[in-house]
Amino acid sequence: MTHKYLVTESFDPGILLLKISRTEALNALNSDVLRELKDFLTEEAQNPKTRVIILTGDGTKAFIAGADISEMKEKNPEEGVFFAQMGHEVAKLLELMPKPTIAAVNGYALGGGAEMAIACDFIVASENAVFGQPEVGLGVIPGFGATLRLAKFVGLPRAKELIFSGRKVRAQEALALGLVNHVYPQDQLIPQAIELARSISQQSAGAVARAKQLLNEFSESSGLNFKLDAEAQAFGRLFGSADQVEGMTAFVEKRKPQFQGL
Ligand code: CAA
């Protein structure tokens, strides 16, 4: 299968490096990228040769700078819900597939980009990584799972602070918060992520898969679909509001938004 926005590389034993490659928009996720990711991950989830997946962004500036604002700007509530559901399908594949997924965050991981990172089993980052959930500054809320998953990484009060303020967090703070497991110099990020993946892919694949399933079940997952659906509905309902239109238009026009309070 050929992909427009995905680049892959394989390393022994069974390590797949998956790069999102849309560098002209800092690897932002539009519907086409999400569709490619869903098809690709659905296949890889079943591929016995793949033992660990490392997700990263192409280039040195961004992991994923979020969902594509230019595309979202025009959406109505129904389309907003559908778009969130597309993101959820990809995030659930990363979270629930029976093999470990590691996010190697190599720059901006904002909005839907940070949400793809926290859907992975854990995160490693380069020194220039920047995390954030800036959605409220666009007149919407996180739509790809952060209202559910961020608290699992950083605890509820910190998740609230980060989502309410949209504050960006650099790599060292992310390490202190427990959002990332390790921080490496930029040129060491992928080699170190591969080493980490190798330490996993040499173990029993069946045992690792079972451990992942139990860790997920014990840490939360009950009602996962119900909660994600509630997030998608709430995300979609904000589309068409004065603040969503203003917030996203302001981004595209490269100016500060003037909010009315929804
Ligand atoms: N969507 C669409 N295009 C984006 C984008 C995004 N999320 N992020 C960056 N781009 C585009 C820019 O528009 C720009 O395109 P042009 O060259 O055509 O103008 C290009 O990528 C390079 O970006 P900048 O010139 O802005 O680069 P910068 O270094 O000045 O700033 C940045 C980098 C701080 C990451 C800035 O690009 C930015 O703030 N991006 C938006 C981040 C954001 O708000 N993400 C959340 C989106 S909402 C979301 O994800 C909802 C959800 O939960 C599902």
Image: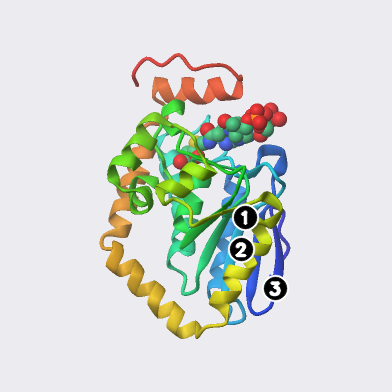
Q: Which badge, 2 or 1, is on the more N-terminal residue?
A: 1
Write down the quadrant of residue 37 in the picture.
Answer: bottom right
Residue placed at 47% from the left, 42% from the top?
173
Element marked by disc 2: helix
Element marked by disc 3: strand
Amino acid type of the residue that numbered disc 1 sits on in the rendered structure = Thr
Q: Which residue is mark 2?
A: 193
Quarter of the image with the N terminus in it: bottom right
Where residue 32 appears, x then y in whole percent? Answer: 62, 49
User: Can residue 127 be spotted in the picture?
Assistant: yes
Where residue 55 appears, x then y in whole percent? Answer: 59, 59
Write down the quadrant of residue 15 in the picture.
Answer: bottom right
User: Can residue 70 be spotted in the picture?
Assistant: no
Q: Are marks 2 and 1 in contact (CB under 8 Å)?
A: yes
Q: Is residue 214 left or right of residue 95?
A: left
Q: Is residue 38 left or right of residue 238?
A: right
Q: Mark 3: give few (<14), some (14-19) or many (20+) Cα within 10 Å.
A: few
Q: Which badge, 2 or 3, is on the more N-terminal residue?
A: 3
Q: Nearer the viewer, mark 2 or mark 3?
A: 2
Q: How is the image coloured?
A: rainbow
Q: Which residue is mark 3?
A: 11
Task: Say if disc 2 is inside 8 Å of ligand 1.
Answer: no
Q: Which residue is mark 1?
A: 56
Amino acid type of the residue that numbered disc 2 sits on in the rendered structure = Ala
Q: Nearer the viewer, mark 2 or mark 1?
A: 2
Task: Say if disc 1 is inside 8 Å of ligand 1.
Answer: no
Q: Give the distance between the C-alpha atoms of the residues marked 2 and 1, in whole angstroms.
A: 10 Å
Where residue 129 appears, x then y in whole percent? Answer: 58, 44
Q: Are marks 2 and 3 in contact (CB under 8 Å)?
A: no
Q: Which badge, 3 or 1, is on the more N-terminal residue?
A: 3
Q: Give the distance between the C-alpha atoms of the residues marked 3 and 1, in whole angstroms.
A: 15 Å
